[in-house]
Amino acid sequence: MAVGKSAIGHQLAQQLGARFVDTDVEVVARHGTIADIFAGRGESAFRELEARAVAQAVEDAADSATVISLGGGAVLDSGTQQLLANCTVVYLECDADTVSERIARNSGRPLLAGDAMERWRVLFATRQPVYERLANLTLDVRSGSVPDLADRLQDALARLAAAHTGTAATPAATKKVEM
């Protein structure tokens, strides 16, 4: 949450000549703002919509180079975890200092109502083990510009692809990248 998934994912997709999908944007386009979904239908309804958006994005990416940005809580769904087993998953590693300014600027996050940083710490403590377990790659996003971070991720993807094939490979060989 607030680690730069959308910005880094979009930049990476541009560099790879791949399609970019942000599942939060897809949910909002079809169902209204996340805050309104939470207020009117609750978190569980949002999570169901989110899981469907992730499943659709993964299905649509089956035969194309695609970078998919997931909402921070999307990985908590067991069905989503199963889908991600067939994807290259990147964990954007951060800490509270990294995200505090971004969270302060964006008060529209329903799960961060009240003491936003304390809520973030609690959510992160719950989610971090899942992020680490699902990740094929971890990218430290505590420092660096978005283009720099995307370059580092592109290099890491190339190394991962080469390790899997035993040859020098381009990052475009990785069909789907989930962030």
Image (cartoon, rainbow, N blue to C red):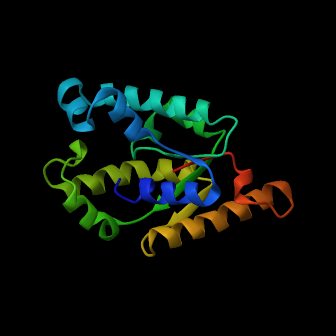
**Residue occupying the far left of the picture:** 114
Vertical position of residue 117 compared to residue 63: above or below: below
The percent position of residue 23, horizontal first and vertical second, equals 44, 39
The percent position of residue 42, horizontal first and vertical second, equals 24, 28
**Residue occupying the far bottom of the picture:** 143
**Residue occupying the far right of the picture:** 167
Is any atom of residue 44 visible in this view?
A: no
Using the rendered view, name the quadrant where residue 105 is placed. bottom left
The percent position of residue 154, horizontal first and vertical second, equals 63, 64
Which residue is depicted at the point 22% across and 37% down? 35
Which residue is depicted at the point 29% across and 57% down? 121
The percent position of residue 130, horizontal first and vertical second, equals 49, 47
Vertical position of residue 48 compared to residue 160: above or below: above
Which residue is depicted at the point 31% across and 65% down? 96
What is the count of numbered marks?
0
Q: In the image, is 28 to the left or to the right of 56?
A: left
Closer to the camera in the image, 168 or 123:
168
Q: In the image, is 81 to the left or to the right of 22?
A: right
Q: In the image, is 2 to the left or to the right of 129?
A: left
Using the rendered view, name the quadrant where residue 151 is placed. bottom right
Which residue is depicted at the point 83% across and 64% down? 168
Is any atom of residue 137 visible in this view?
A: yes
